[in-house]
Image (cartoon, rainbow, N blue to C red):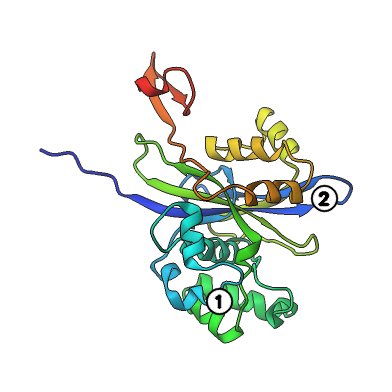
Amino acid sequence: MQAMTTIIKPAATVILMRDAEESGFEILMVKRSSRSAFGSIYVFPGGKLDQEDSTPELYSYCKGMTDSEASRKLGIEKDGLAYWIACIRECFEEVGVLLTETNDSIIQDTFKLNALRDKLNNQEISFKDICISEALNLRAKDIVPCAHWITPTIEPKRFDTRFFLAKVDSKQLASHDGFELTESTWIKPQDALQRLEQGEMNMIIPTIENIKTLSQFSSSKDAFDYFDSLKDEEIPPILPKFIKKDGNWIGFLPGDEGYDDV
């Protein structure tokens, strides 16, 4: 009997950054519900791409980025902009931050913004409906890819996930949805790593490695500008590998000794 092939689903994750009150910058981390995939761990907002994310009509609401530019940057043939759309949609669904131009009228109307988010999460409307009704100017130019991770083969659910950075106004609030996410917190990358070491925040490898990378920058601008300066296709995919030895799982990342032998 032939083994079943696990479908690898495309996904997008967005790391929101804002300037800290005193110095440095903070990132938004959320805790997933124990009922969801990767339950009870701290992650960044994101999820799998929806079919609607890759529609030309939605692309027309993205400012500063075309599908050909996005696709070229990711090294794929087409529908690269769908990842930007997914970032913006998931960010709005999960934490209530809408990455659209600040002069869009909806940003000034918190009551309406929350009502649209509720309808979206209750599947009463689609994200495209919101873009059309509010004539949004989605801030695609302010979102930049920063990492590319593929779920290991040992996992029953696998994702091909692109990670992105996005800067937000320090005054912009964020709140978890209470369903998929049970906590949300703004935290400096160095503090997140410290809480991980102390056992206060449980994370998976891609989250940890992204935070380690961000901890090397002194400001959100420096981090954003660095990744924005990378050439097309300059972010390689990372596929962790695992072997079981003496009853314990041992992980390997590209470049680790023994990775190619797994």
Q: Is residue 126 visible?
A: no
Rendered view: 171 above or below 158 = below
Q: Quadrant of the N terminus?
A: top left
Disc 1 packing (10 Å; few <14; some 14–19; many ≥20):
many
Q: Quadrant of the C terminus?
A: top left
- Return the x and y of residue 98 as percentages of the image width and height: 64, 69
CA–CA distance in space, label 2 to label 1: 30 Å
- Residue extending furthest toward the bottom: 133
- Residue extending furthest toward the right: 22
Q: Nearer the viewer, residue 238 or 195?
A: 238
Residue 61: image tag: 1
Helix, strand, or loop for circle 1?
A: loop
The first of marks 2 and 1 along the sequence is 2
Q: Quadrant of residue 105?
A: bottom right
- Return the x and y of residue 137 as percentages of the image width and height: 62, 76
- Give the residue at x 42% y 18%: 258
- Give the residue at x 54% y 66%: 89
In the displayed structure image, the side of residue 60 where residue 196 appears, left or right: right
Q: Quadrant of residue 195?
A: top right
Give the residue pinned by disc 2.
20
Q: Is residue 88 visible?
A: yes
Amino acid tagged 2: Ala
In the displayed structure image, the side of residue 2 where residue 251 appears, left or right: right
Amino acid tagged 1: Tyr
In the displayed structure image, the side of residue 155 where residue 218 appears, left or right: right
Disc 2 packing (10 Å; few <14; some 14–19; many ≥20):
some
Residue 191: image tag: none
- Return the x and y of residue 200 as percentages of the image width and height: 67, 35
- Label 2 with label 1: CB-CB less than 8 Å: no
Helix, strand, or loop for circle 2?
A: loop
In the displayed structure image, the side of residue 67 where residue 181 appears, left or right: right
